């Protein structure tokens, strides 16, 4: 029986980013439909543009590049492609996540959880959304909490990511019961009730894809 790997290399990290980009592309219709109900309907397309730019930028990155270099390249590409809303949020997430990986040659469960936590904190700091505001923060925060709990339980890299994905999924579903207080959908007020936040949904897709990607890697 094969076991899932306990640490990944920078090349495997790039492959994970590529996999996220493919998943966002595949789900962009669903994400834009969610945004169409409570926003301007562009979230899926916007995220797909950002992740396509990330994939293109990483296609040309040297094999000698560090996790931090990879994250900074992704940040720049995403921000150049998506100037508004999600652009600065994800660029900050990549940069903060990358800073948390400085000097690392491989990424294990603890560093992966640190990466996710730093990325999520970047989104919180940049966007200034509070938990309960019906934003992507409502998926990122439970994802971080679940990943940290899994790590504290001694879970594997793949299981920590699965916990993050499950936390994000619960958080995403919970946004349906929230009234938007940030962004365009806040103008809808109570009418946003009953609909999930598209940013929380793309967060779930991202973390689920990371979990699936790592689970697919075996020694
Ligand atoms: Mg939008």
Image (cartoon, rainbow, N blue to C red):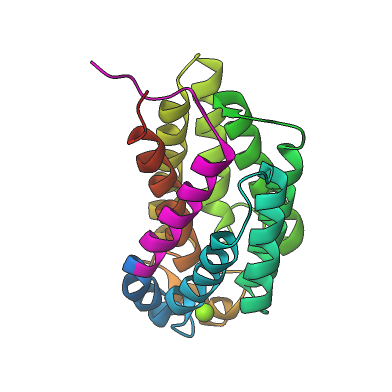
**Residue at the far left in the pictured view:** 1
Q: Nearer the viewer, residue 142 or 52?
A: 52
Residue 34 quadrant: bottom left
Q: Is residue 20 above or below residue 165?
A: below
Quadrant for the C terminus, please: top left
- The image position of residue 193, as x and y in percent, is 42, 68
Magenta highlight on residue 96: no
- Residue in the image at 65% along x and 33% along y: 114
Magenta highlight on residue 8: yes
Q: Which residues are magenta?
A: 1-25
Q: Is residue 179 above or below residue 219?
A: below
- What secondary structure do most residues of the magenta stretch adopt? helix
- The image position of residue 175, as x and y in percent, is 45, 58
- Residue in the image at 48% along x and 61% along y: 178
- The image position of residue 64, as x and y in percent, is 66, 44
Numbered label tally: 0
Q: Is residue 191 above or below residue 198?
A: below
Image-based side of 64 in relation to 38, left or right: right
Image-based side of 28 in relation to 199, left or right: left
Quadrant for the N terminus, please: top left
- Residue in the image at 49% along x and 41% along y: 12
Tell me if I can see residue 178 in this picture. yes
- The image position of residue 152, as x and y in percent, is 56, 17
Q: Is residue 130 above or below residue 99?
A: below
Tell me if I can see residue 123 in this picture. no
Q: Nearer the viewer, residue 178 or 155?
A: 155
């Amino acid at each position: 029986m094969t076991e899932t790997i306990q640490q990944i290399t920078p090349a495997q990290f790039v492959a994970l980013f590529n996999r996220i980009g493919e998943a966002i592309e595949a789900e962009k219709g669903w994400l834009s439909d969610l945004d169409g109900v409570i926003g301007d309907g562009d979230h899926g397309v916007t995220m797909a543009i950002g992740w396509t730019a990330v994939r293109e930028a990483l296609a040309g990155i040297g094999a000698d590049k560090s996790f931090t270099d990879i994250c900074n390249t992704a940040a720049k590409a995403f921000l150049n492609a998506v100037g508004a809303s999600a652009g600065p949020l994800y660029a900050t997430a990549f940069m903060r996540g990358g800073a948390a990986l400085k000097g690392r040659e491989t990424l294990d469960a603890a560093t992966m959880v640190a990466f996710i936590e730093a990325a999520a904190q970047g989104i919180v700091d940049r966007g200034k959304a509070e938990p309960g505001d019906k934003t992507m923060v409502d998926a990122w925060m439970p994802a971080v909490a679940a990943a940290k709990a899994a790590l504290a339980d001694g879970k594997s890299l793949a299981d920590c990511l699965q916990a993050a994905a499950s936390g994000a999924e619960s958080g995403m579903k919970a946004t349906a019961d929230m009234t938007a207080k940030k962004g365009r959908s806040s103008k809808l007020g109570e009418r946003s009730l009953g609909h999930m936040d598209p940013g929380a949904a793309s967060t779930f897709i991202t973390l689920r894809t990371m979990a699936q990607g790592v689970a697919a890697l075996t020694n």
